[in-house]
Amino acid sequence: MWTGKYVRSPLVRSLFLNMVTESEAPAAEWYRCTPDLLGDSLRPLFVQSHLDSSTKAFLKRSAEKSSWLFTQLYHSFVSTVLSPLVSRTSINGFLGRGSMFVFSADQFQRLLQISPDWKAERLLDLGAGDGSVTEMMGAHFREIYATEVSLPMRWHLQRRNYKLLGIDEWQQTGFQYDVISCLNLLDRCNDPLHLLQDIRQMLVPKTGRLILAAVLPFQPYVEIGGRWERPKEHLKIKGKTWEEQVTNLSNEVFRRAGFEVEAVTRLPYLCEGDMYSDYYVLDDAVFVLKASDGTKESAH
């Protein structure tokens, strides 16, 4: 799960991190990839990403929030009380904390090979959380749809005026989507292959794209209330390194679901921190996928 260093005293931890986070942030490691270790078909599709201004701004905001000591103490108390009963996502939604950062607008555009003024009809963001990542992608779409199982997070999405769909409703709308985002959801659902196959059917033929982020190493669990359980369908991703697991995902999982990779990059999956850490970070592989129909058309 989320990684971080720990000091016994939360107050000392908070004060210490405010002083050293910027100098200790291992930003270079977040984006490191050895393309030669990727499979032959993936190697030319790798897009090198870097720490950019939008990512730095998110880290700065997270550091500022983590220094609000009394707010963080309140959040810690509420989390302790509710965690046996309510999912972590819902607790964060109730508290208005825990926003995620997957990619910046520039990184999104580079992956999809689109210009800043590119527009399409429909975006569907599956498992959209509080909508912060949805908002960044939404600048390119006339209609924005989202799904989310957490009720407090759904309230956040409604306040942003997104069109909310049920988790069994987005496949029954009678229309298709130009882009579907599935960000860090594959390891948190019961039937990941079935989900991928549903997504493929709901993309606009030929030009539709799936942007998918997966935390590596791949450790699938489903959160039910305050408990973590193994999913019904357990994808086994082979490989010890990031590059090996990316290659295995591409060759085994995506191919079985009827997709081929158009682009892939390595990015940090960032989450706002608490009194123990300015932010938390996981290792993401972010893919742009298209249906395996033999066409070579791009997102534009």
Image (cartoon, helix red, strand yellow):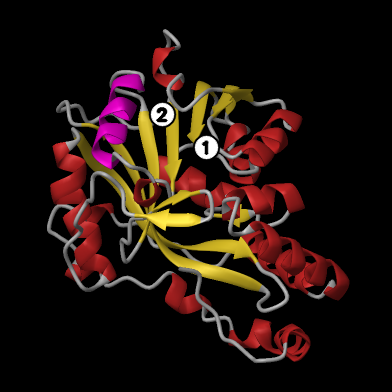
Q: Quadrant where the N terminus lies?
A: bottom left
Where residue 259 sits: x, y (%)?
A: 22, 36
Q: Amino acid at mark 1?
A: Ser
Of residues 276 and 46, the one nearer the viewer is 276
- Mark positioned earlier in the residue sequence (1 or 2): 1
Q: Is residue 142 visible?
A: no
Mark 1 Cα-neighbour bin, 10 Å: few <14, some 14–19, many ≥20: few
User: Which disc is residue 115 wearing?
Assistant: 1
Task: State the predominant SS element of the stretch in magenta.
Answer: helix
Q: Position of residue 201 (x, y in %)?
A: 29, 21
Query: Could you tell whether 159 is left or right of 235 in the image?
Result: right
Q: Of the numbered discs in the image, which one, if any, rests on residue 286?
A: none
Query: Can residue 185 be seen at all in this image of the molecule?
Result: yes
Alpha-carbon neighbours of circle 2 within 10 Å: few (<14), some, or many (≥20)? few
| Stretch in magenta | 192-202
* Residue at (23, 50) in percent of width and height: 234
The C terminus appears in which quarter of the rendering? top left
* Residue at (69% x, 89% y) in the render: 20
State the residue position of label 2: 300
Is residue 198 found inside the magenta-colored segment of the image? yes
Dot 2 amino acid type:
His
Q: Answer with the quarter of the image where residue 172 lies.
A: top left
Give the Cα distance between marks 1 and 2.
9 Å
Residue 272 vs 142, above or below: the answer is: below
Q: Position of residue 152 (x, y in %)?
A: 68, 40
Q: Is the residue 12 above or below the residue 272 in the image? A: below
Q: Quadrant of residue 275?
A: bottom right
Residue 143 is situated, as x and y percent measured from the top left of the image, at 59, 20
Residue under the image location 73 percent in, 48 percent down:
94
Q: Secondary structure at mark 1?
A: loop
Q: Are dots 1 and 2 in contact, CB under 8 Å?
A: yes
